[in-house]
């Protein structure tokens, strides 16, 4: 197939125009792109929360006074919840302070009780 120079020039002009119009006509991300981005954000937040939970639990494991305590750690949106049992009232406050000292923790909800 042989194209004349004028035909090729016209065809290329239409292609360039179509690409330019499709780029200009975009009013932002599509619904699908927004859903994918939201899913990735959720997955990222979940992984961040899991990392915080692991770090807080490690802090308690490293502290001799909490090794045999029954502390459950959960994290949602960087807010740590402590539940379970410790040996004394002073342990409740100390556990909260230790959890709050972990990088990434925005707040601590303390539901610990003395056993």
Image (tube, helix red, strand yellow):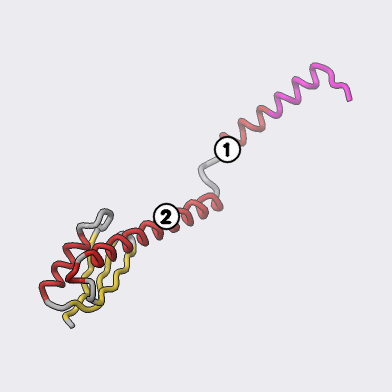
Relative to residue 38, is residue 88 drawn left or right?
left
Q: Residue furthest top?
A: 5
Q: Quadrant of residue 46?
A: bottom left
Vertical comparison of 114 with 75: above or below? below
Q: Is residue 110 above or below residue 113?
A: above
Quadrant of the drawing holding the C terminus: bottom left
54 sits to left or right of 113: right
Q: Main secondary structure of the magenta part?
A: helix
The answer to which of marks 2 and 1 sits earlier in the sequence is 1
Q: Nearer the viewer, residue 68 or 70?
A: 68
Q: Secondary structure at mark 1?
A: loop
Q: Which residues are magenta?
A: 1-15
Picture coordinates of residue 16, whole percent (x, y): 66, 27
- Seen in the image, is 14 located left or right of residue 107? right
Which residue is under mark 2? 44
Kindly identify the residue that appears in the image at 43 percent across and 54 percent down. 41
Res 25 label: 1
Q: Secondary structure at mark 2?
A: helix
57 part of magenta stretch: no
Asked which quadrant contains residue 76, the reply is bottom left
Seen in the picture, residue 72 relative to 10 is either above or below; the reply is below
The one of 114 and 66 positioned closer to us in this rendering: 66
Q: Residues within 10 Å of mark 1 (few under 14, many from 20)?
A: few
Residue at 75%, 22% in the rendered image: 10
Instruction: Tell me if 76 is positioned left or right of 110 in this view.
Output: right
In this orientation, which residue lies closer to the viewer: 67 or 11?
67
Please identify, in this view, whether the residue under mark 2 or under mark 1 is nearer the observer: 2
Residue at 58%, 35% in the rendered image: 23
Q: Is residue 71 above or below residue 42?
A: below
């Amino acid at each position: 197939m042989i194209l004349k120079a004028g035909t090729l020039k016209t065809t290329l002009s239409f292609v360039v125009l179509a690409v330019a119009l499709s780029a200009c006509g975009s009013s932002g991300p599509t619904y699908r792109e927004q859903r994918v981005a939201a899913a990735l954000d959720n997955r990222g937040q979940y992984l961040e929360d899991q990392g915080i939970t692991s770090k807080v639990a490690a802090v308690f494991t490293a502290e001799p006074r909490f090794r045999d305590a029954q502390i459950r750690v959960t994290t949602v949106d960087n807010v740590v919840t402590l539940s379970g049992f410790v040996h004394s009232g002073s342990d409740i406050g100390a556990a909260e302070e230790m959890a709050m000292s972990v990088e990434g923790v925005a707040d601590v909800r303390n539901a610990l009780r003395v056993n």
